[in-house]
Image (spheres, grey):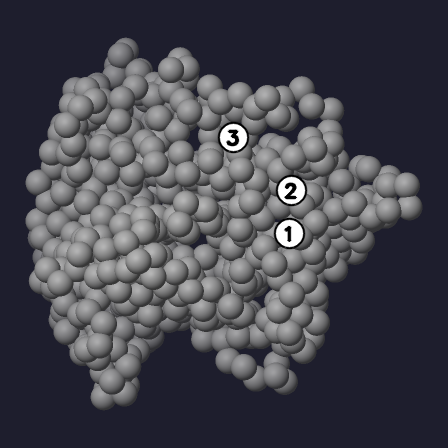
Amino acid sequence: MDSNAAPVPVKEKKIPVKKVTKLKTVSKKIKTIVRDISWLSFNARVLQEAADTNVPLLERIRFLGIFSNNLDEFFRVRVATLKRMGAVGKTAKMHLEENPDQILEEIQRTVLSQQQEFNRIWKEIEEALKNEKIFLHTEKQLNREQQKYVQDYFSEEVRTNIIPLMIESIPHMPYLRDKSIYLAVVLSKEDNSIRQKFALIEIPASVLPRFLILPSKEGEHDIILLEDVIRYNLPHIFSYFGYDKFSSYIIKVTRDAELDIDNDIATSLIHQIEKGLKARRKGKPVRFIYDQQIDPLLLEYLMRRLGLSKKDNLIPGGRIHNFKDFMDFPAKVFTRERVHRKTFIHPLFQNAPSVMQVIAQSDVMLHFPYHSFDTIIDLLREAAMDPNVTTIKITAYRLAKNSKIINALINAVRNGKQVSVVLELRARFDEEANLKWKERLEEEGVKVLYGVPGMKVHAKLCVIKKRIANKTVQYGFVSTGNLNEKTAKLYGDHCLLTTNRNIMADINRIFSYLENRSHDEKILNACKTLIVSPHNMRKFFVRMIEREIRNAQRKKKASIILKMNSLSDEELISKLYDAAKAGVTVQLIIRGICCAFTENKKWKKNIEAISIIDEYLEHARVFIFHNNGHERVFTASSDWMVRNLDHRVEAAVSIENPTIKKELMEILNIQLNGNVKVRVLDNEQQNAYKHTPGRKMRAQVEIFKYLHEKTYL
C-alpha cells in the first residue's frame, strides 16, 4: 500500500448503540421506516464515529461537529416541515398516514437520547485531549499571563464586534439569528442593592475564530473558546451598570429554514428567492437549546419572550453549543498529525499536454476524492484558452467559495467563447452564494439560465464544442457530485469524461430542454444513453427491477446493486420488495436515509443493506443490474427519493465503456465486502457493525489502493 494511505485499524472497537426508535410505518400499502427516524439513525452512525477510540482524536472531534451540523439542518428543514403539517391537522395525517405530532414526539425522545450520548462522548474526548496535553480552559482556569492575554485580545479584537442587549428594557424581543449562539447573562449585585437584570450577547463566531490558543507551558496547548473570552470580560462590559456578580449560559435558537417559493409567474424567480431568504431569517423557532445549568428564572423569561412552550423541542445540553465549529478545531495543537491519503492525478492525465486529447481517445472515469479534481479545472481552463473552442455549457448547483470553475468560465468569455451556465438558485443554504455568482457571471457576459419553474436542476453536466477541420467535436462530462473543488477532496463521487456521440447528443438535448422556455419534454424523448428525471427515470428503473424479477422467476441469475445517499421512494422500495420476494439478490449501499425494510419471512431472499461512514463522505450514486449476464451499470446525480425523481432535473448515464464498467463494479464489490466502518441496516435501525471472518477490510483504504495501483494500457 502507498505510504500516503491511512493505516487500517487492527481491531475495531464495538460501540454500543441504543435502538433509535420503535418500528414505524408511513404507508398502509407499503411498509417503510419513517424517513425522519431513519435520518436520525444515520446521524447516530456519525455519532458512532465520534465514539470510536480507534478514530484519531481530531477526527472524533470533527465527527461531533458533523453530527451537530447535521442536526441543525434536520431541525431547520424536516422538523419545521412536520410542524407545518401538524398545524394543518387532518390533511397532513392523510398525506403522511401518520400523525406529525407523534413523529415529532419520537424525534424529541431520540434527540434527547442522542444528546446524552453526545455529552458522554465529549467528556471522554476532553479526557483524551488532556492526555495529549491539550487543555480547554474556561474563563475561571486562566493563569495571570493568560488573563492578560485574554483581556488584550478582547480589547483589540472582540469588543467592537459585540453589542450587549439589555433585553428587559426592550419592548420587543430582539430577533435571535438561526446560526448564532448567544450568551444569556444574569447581572446582579452581591449585596442585592440593585435588582438583577438579564442581557444577551451574540457570540461573533462568524467574524472571529471560535478557538483562541493561549500562551502555554512548553509541550502543552491551552485553548479557550470565544464565548469564554467574553465571559471573562463581563465585568468590563457591564462596569458602568454597577453590577459585580455575573452568571452566563449559552443558548441557541434553530428556525424554520425552508424557502416558500410560490409559482407566481408575475414575480421573477430571483425576487422570489430574495424574498424567501428574508423570510428564512425570521423563520419560526423549531428548537431551543440551552445550558442545562441555566438560571431557572432566566430560562422561564426567555421562553416567555420567545413564545416557546414545552412542545417546542427544548433541548437541555452542556456548556458548549454550535459544535459545528468544532469541524475547524485547530489541528496544529496536535503533535502527532494524521497521515492522510493524498489525491493523485488519474494515470491517463499524468504528464498529458491536453485533457481533451486524452478523452478524445477514450472515455475516462474520475473517482473523487482519490483522483484529483484538478483535471476538471484543467479541462475548463484548456477550453477557455483553446482558440478552436466555440461554446461551453455547464450546470452548477453548489460551488466553492472561491470557485476555480467560475474563474475558468469567466476567462472563456473573455476569450470570445459562448458560455452558458444553468445556475440553481434554490440549492438549499447556498441560495445567497449563488445569487452573488449570478451577478458576477452576468457582469462578465456569461449567459445564466435558471432552469425549470418549480424544479431544481440537480444534474451535473457539461458540454464543450470545438471546431476541428470544419467539423464540430464535442467533449463533456456527467458527474454524480457538485462542481466544487473543496468538497471534491472530501466527497466520494464519480465523473465520466467523454466524447461519446450518443452521450454528448443527450447532454445537448437536456440543455435544449433547459433553454427552451416551454420546457417541452418531447425534446428528451430521443435520449439514448441518459435517463432523465422527471421525464422517465422512475419508469426506467422500475422496468430494470422488473426485468430482474422476470429473470429470477425463470430460474436465471438475477441481482441488483444500488449505491446512493438516500432511499425513501415508496414505489421503488415496493419494487425492491417484489424483487426480494422473487429471489433476486438485492444489495444496498446507503449512506443516509434508508426507509426500506431488509428482512421479511415471505421473501425468498432478504435484502442486504449496509452503510459506510468513514473519512470521506460517500456521495456517489451507482446502480448495477445483472441483466442475465450483460450487466447494465449507471451513475447518477439522483437518489431514489420523491424529490429527485419527480421534482428535480436529474441525469443518470448508462456506462458502456467495458473498462469503466468493470472498474465501477469492482469498486462497489470492495465496498460490499468491507467489514471496517460498515454498519448493517436492519429492520430495527440498530446500526450494528458488520463483522465477517478473515482479514479486516476498510473499503476507502482498499479503493485508494486499487485506484493508485491501477494501470491503463
Earlier-in-chain disc, 1 versus 3? 3
Alpha-carbon distance for marks 1 and 3? 23 Å
Q: Nearer the viewer, residue 212 or 581?
A: 581
Kind of residue indicated by mark 1: Ile
**Residue furthest front as drawn:** 554
Residue beneath disc 2: 498
Q: Earlier in the sequence, mark 1 or mark 2?
A: 2
Q: Quadrant of the N terminus?
A: top left
- Give above or below for 428 relative to 636: below
Seen at 42% across and 64% down, the residue is 543
Going from the N terminus, do you reach mark 2 or mark 3 first? 3
Q: CB atoms at circles 1 and 2 under 8 Å apart?
A: yes
How far apart, in angstroms, are the residues tagged by discs 1 and 2? 8 Å
Name which quarter of the figure residue 211 lies in.
top left
Asked if the residue at tag 3 contacts the one at tag 2, i.e. Cβ–Cβ closer than 8 Å, the answer is no
Instruction: Determine if residue 315 is in view.
Output: no
The residue identified by callout 3 is 371
Residue 153: where, in percent of width, then height? 39, 33
- Neighbour tally class for label 3: few under 14, some 14-19, many 20 plus, Cα within 10 Å: many
Which residue position is annotated with label 1?
503
**Compared to 663, does 188 lie above or below?**
below
Task: Mark 2: give few (<14), some (14-19) or many (20+) Cα within 10 Å.
Answer: many
Q: Nearer the viewer, residue 279 or 663?
A: 663
